[in-house]
Image (cartoon, grey):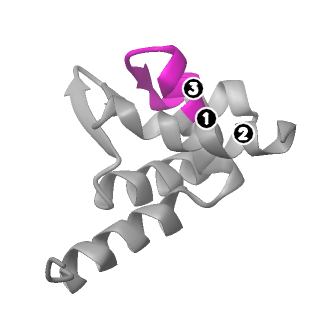
Amino acid sequence: MSDIDIEQLEIAANRLKAIAHPLRIALISMLQEKEKLCVTDMYTKLGIEQATASHHLNILKINGILVCKREGKQVYYSLKVKTLTKILDCINNCNTI
């Protein structure tokens, strides 16, 4: 049996906590459909305030789920790891069991 890496378990738990919010799941789902999106596109589509979108995007970025890149005046976000969406697919499929 291999040694348990407590630090890696903490990182994984924090990432799952970061995902576990309806707006953050919506943001991730939007980024699953498009390679990258700017903040304006996301908060407009979700019908929320810019500050709210930025707050949730920052939580996802801090936890290593998203990356961002500034292009002119716009900040574009994308998923750091595309396979992350498999977790959401798995959770969504639990409803059909």
Image disc number at residue 30: 3
Q: From what the image shows, is residue 12 above or below residue 35?
A: below
Front position in the image: 53 or 64: 64
Which residues, given as a range, are shown in magenta? 29-41
x 55%, y 22%: residue: 41
Amino acid bearing label 1: Asp
Element at label 2: helix
Q: Amino acid at mark 3?
A: Met
Find disc 1 in the rendering and name its residue: 89
Identify the residue at the far left of this view: 3
Residue 24, placed above or below residue 41: below
What secondary structure is marked by label 3? helix
Q: In terms of depth relative to the viewer, which is nearer, 95 or 84? A: 95
Q: Which mark is residue 92?
A: 2
Identify the residue at horizontal 49%, vertical 35% (top origin).
85
Residue 51 left/right relative to 39: right
